Amino acid sequence: MAPKEKKKPKGLPIANQMRRYRFEHGEMTQAELGEKIGMTRQTIAAIEAGKYSPSLEAAFRIARVFNAKLEDVFQWTDD
Amino acid sequence: MSFREKSAWITLISVLLTFGAYYGALLLGLIQPQSMSAFHFGLIAIIALIILQVGLHIIAALLNPTDARTPRDEREKLIQARSHTVGYYVMLVGMMVTVLATHIPSLGEDLGLHSFMVTVYLGAGVMVIASLAVAIAQIIMFRRGA
């Protein structure tokens, strides 16, 4: 069963689909993703939870791991 | 909890233990502020702080060596930079208070201290408070996400 889509957290205007993409990529763990892009598991968890907005470079790295477009993984939400 | 967050906790606890005990003893009158023993206890506090910091960091690194070896990522660098900004402002205000306090002649007399000693104790205290502010700011930011 696919994990539920995360709601956009208060404060930050960027939503992400990282959890879904991790699930679709062999249930990749946060630690594994972090290792691939040189980040700690805690930072991946903070990005996923919408508590931290990654830099553009980090966002591209994450999208590349999932072979996805940046805008498929991260979305700007005005409202 | 990441190694960097553990490191912030280690700093907070070790500074509170060592300099809390030192300034506590001074305020309670267990050490005479004007005496050489105050200087010696100050040195002991600094040495104890170094031993505690090194020892606890080694233990934290041994518990999770991979995490300890991993270089800081962008979020950890951001938290470090922001926390040091907090520490800078605390230090700035503290140093202004120290300079002003040094120019209040009655303060030293009330405490039975030479004005130079007032400056030394307040100056050192400000550095301790600034390092506590950095550690607390880091812990809060690690808990919040960034």
Image (cartoon, helix red, strand yellow):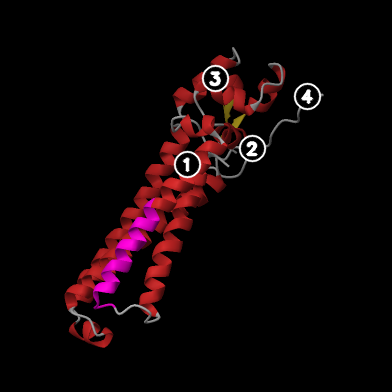
> Quick check: A58 above or below B53?
above
Distance from disc 4 to disc 3, alpha carbons, whole Å, reads: 23 Å
The residue that appears at 62% across and 37% down in the rendered structure is: A49
Comparing A47 with B127, the one in front is: B127
* Chain under disc 1: B
> Quick check: A70 above or below B140?
above
Distance from disc 2 to disc 3, alpha carbons, whole Å, reads: 25 Å
Residue tagged 1: B58
Residue tagged 3: A36
Residue tagged 4: A2
- Left or right of B54, for residue B100: left
Q: Nearer the viewer, mark 2 or mark 3?
A: 3
* Chain under disc 3: A
- Left or right of B48, for residue A41: right
Comparing B103 with B23, the one in front is: B23
Does label 4 or label 2 sit earlier along the sequence? 4
The residue segment tinted magenta is B33-50
Q: Say which amino acid is labelled 4.
A: Ala
User: Magenta region, mostly helix, strand or loop?
Assistant: helix
Q: Say which amino acid is labelled 1.
A: Ile
For the residues tagged 4 and 3, is the chain the same?
yes
Residue B8 is inside the magenta segment: no
Distance from disc 1 to disc 4, alpha carbons, whole Å, reads: 41 Å
Q: Position of residue B45 (x, y in %)?
A: 36, 62
On the rendered image, what quadrant is the N terminus of chain B found in? top right
Does label 2 or label 3 sit earlier along the sequence? 2
Residue lying farthest to the right in this orientation: A1
Disc 1 on helix, strand or loop? helix
Does label 4 or label 3 sit earlier along the sequence? 4
Q: Quadrant of residue B126?
A: bottom left
Disc 4 residue crowd, few under 14, some 14–19, many 20+, Cα 10 Å? few
